[in-house]
Image (cartoon, helix red, strand yellow):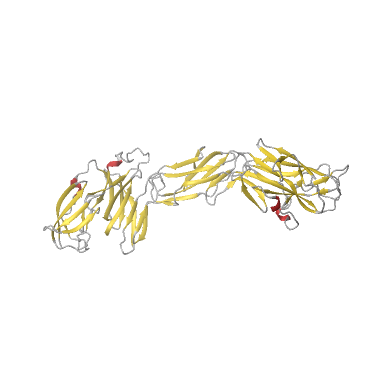
């Protein structure tokens, strides 16, 4: 029994097919089943090694026979080995298996009970050539953007080249002695770009943001490993407005919407096209299509822009989410206060000479320090805030005490465009430029406090400090009653959390190697 192999390559591809003999492990020119002395299923004495080169385009590799000279009116099939005679009327069906590694011939099993693990070889002249069957199968392997796959049993298996084909034959019928022959064709065919491009979003704003004065950014990448990315298009519009769009040919895309400076809702989607016209969208539920399907606008995603944030909690983080990942976000870390409070956090009109102003209500006092981080704008990242062009490293936080703006200080993070400070109460907080910080700014303006009355008037001492510092409170006799580390407010209590007695107290501020002293009077 002899089988000749013939390769048809429909791609300019490196592919090699070698017949390897089991007994010698050497390449040979023919594949045979030897002398068949009994009926049954038999496995060939050789296997086929298939090497495929790397292809940038998807392909498939098929196996079939072409028995043009087989004539048997009672047989609807032509596949397999055929009896060599003047008028061949006998046929031996061929079967195949493919593996990603070599198999020991003794481990292969071909019998009536294992037929479901093999596939019959089809013939190009079969009447049902175009009909798909689970047992008659032509595709051995294929390559797409996810890699190389081989056909193994009921599902495809990812593999690497080379892979190995094993042939068997069905000699269960009544066959005359003689030589049976066929030509096996391997056909490598280009499949075209049947994969839609893929969109990966690195950043997109949440569906609600609280900053109408910041830009809104969308970042990601579009991938098409077959025909490549042609363009990425960003489409958006305001509620009741007209469609706006931007296009880039860069796979790594970044789209921006300039500050809108108002409460509104915007709608948007992103669509990526490859070089043959397949497309995919980032939208509600997503939508995609191939080159022969017209693009239609998908259901857009939406972003609501609000100008204030309300939340009820007893501790935790309040954050004004914005649409700009290139800077930080205004936020408050509220210490535990023992009860639920409804907080409101918003931007308000800034006072003259300031950069930006926030209002945080209610105006309550905390037992522990509260961290506030206030955002200013430097959208062009030139080191100067955008409203008046101040050097961002000079920016400091002030609070409104009902009469005037009081210095708090703060630490600038120029990468995040944030000024941070610790406070013990809420109020209006504004960012002003401070060209030169003086030790006079450290001293409190309160001379007399009445902490036990808790009427919202002179309840505490506010020092103009931030960063690393200590404040020590002494009696006139030099007794230390309170030691504050990096806390800029004294609430009139000692280290045991008891209100101190009435009378004058000395404060000592130590910061950056300097000491400053002053007097505070506690009254009942």
Q: Position of residue 470 (x, y in %)?
A: 22, 52
Instruction: Spot the residue most to the left.
Output: 477
Q: Position of residue 292 (x, y in %)?
A: 63, 42
Total numbered labels placed on residues in the image: 0
| Viewer-proximal residue among 369 and 109 | 109
Please tell me whether residue 266 is drawn above or below residue 344 in the rendered image: above
**Where is residue 326, by image quadrant?**
top left
What residue is drawn where x is 55% and y is 48%? 298
Q: Position of residue 103 (x, y in %)?
A: 67, 49
Instruction: Spot the residue most to the right.
Output: 86
| Viewer-proximal residue among 347 and 417 | 417
Instruction: Spot the residue most to the top.
Output: 12
What residue is drawn where x is 33% and y is 43%? 414
266 left or right of 311? Answer: right
35 left or right of 324? Answer: right
Instruction: Spot the residue most to the front.
Output: 24
459 left or right of 101? Answer: left
Residue 299 in view (yes/no): yes
Image quarter hosting the N terminus: top right
Q: Position of residue 37 (x, y in %)?
A: 82, 51
30 left or right of 395? Answer: right
Residue 293 in view (yes/no): no
| Viewer-proximal residue among 167 and 127 | 167
Image quarter hosting the C terminus: bottom left
């Amino acid at each position: 029994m002899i089988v000749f192999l013939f390769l048809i390559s429909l791609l300019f591809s490196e592919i090699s097919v070698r017949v390897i003999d089991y007994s010698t492990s050497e390449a040979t020119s023919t594949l045979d089943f030897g002398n068949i002395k009994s009926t049954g299923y038999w496995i060939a004495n050789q296997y086929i090694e298939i090497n495929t080169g790397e292809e940038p385009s998807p392909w498939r590799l098929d196996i079939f026979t072409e028995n043009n000279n087989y004539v048997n009116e009672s047989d609807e099939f032509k596949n397999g080995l055929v009896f060599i005679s003047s008028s061949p009327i006998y046929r031996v069906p061929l079967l195949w298996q493919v593996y990603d590694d070599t198999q020991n011939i003794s481990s292969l099993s071909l019998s009536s009970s294992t037929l479901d693990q093999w596939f019959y070889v089809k013939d190009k002249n079969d009447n049902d050539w175009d009909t798909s069957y689970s047992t008659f199968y032509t595709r051995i392997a294929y390559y797409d953007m996810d890699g190389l796959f081989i056909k193994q049993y009921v599902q495809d298996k990812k593999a690497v080249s080379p892979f190995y084909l094993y042939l068997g034959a069905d000699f269960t019928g009544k066959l005359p002695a003689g030589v049976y022959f066929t030509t096996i064709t391997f056909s490598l065919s280009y499949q075209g770009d049947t994969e839609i491009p893929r969109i990966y979003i690195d950043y997109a704003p949440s569906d609600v943001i609280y900053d109408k004065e910041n830009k809104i950014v969308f970042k990601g990448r579009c991938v098409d490993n077959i025909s490549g990315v042609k363009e990425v298009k960003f489409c958006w519009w305001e509620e009741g407005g007209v469609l706006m769009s931007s296009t880039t040919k860069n796979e790594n895309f970044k789209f921006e919407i300039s500050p809108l400076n108002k409460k509104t809702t915007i709608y948007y989607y992103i669509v990526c096209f490859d070089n043959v016209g397949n497309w995919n969208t980032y939208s509600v539920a997503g939508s995609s299509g191939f080159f022969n399907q017209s693009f239609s606008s998908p259901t857009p995603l939406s972003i609501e822009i609000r100008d204030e944030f309300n939340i009820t909690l007893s501790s935790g983080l309040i954050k004004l989410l914005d649409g700009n990942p290139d800077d930080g976000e205004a936020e408050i870390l509220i210490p535990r206060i023992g009860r639920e409070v409804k907080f409101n956090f918003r931007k308000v009109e800034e006072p003259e000479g300031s950069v930006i102003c926030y209002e945080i209500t209610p105006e309550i006092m905390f037992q522990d320090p509260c961290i506030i981080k206030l955002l200013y704008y430097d959208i062009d990242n030139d080191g100067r805030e955008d409203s008046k062009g101040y050097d961002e490293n000079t920016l400091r936080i002030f609070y409104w005490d009902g009469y005037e703006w009081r210095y708090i200080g703060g630490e600038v993070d120029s990468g995040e465009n944030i000024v941070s400070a610790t406070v013990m109460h809420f109020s209006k907080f504004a960012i002003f430029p401070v060209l030169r910080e003086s030790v006079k700014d450290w001293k409190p303006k309160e001379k007399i406090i009445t902490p036990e009355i808790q009427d919202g008037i002179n309840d505490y001492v506010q020092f103009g400090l931030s960063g690393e510092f200590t404040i020590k409170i002494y009696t006139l006799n030099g007794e230390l009653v309170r030691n504050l580390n990096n806390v800029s407010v004294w609430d009139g209590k000692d280290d045991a959390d008891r209100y101190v007695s009435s009378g004058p107290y000395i404060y000592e501020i130590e910061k950056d190697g300097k000491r400053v002293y002053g007097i505070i009077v506690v009254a009942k």
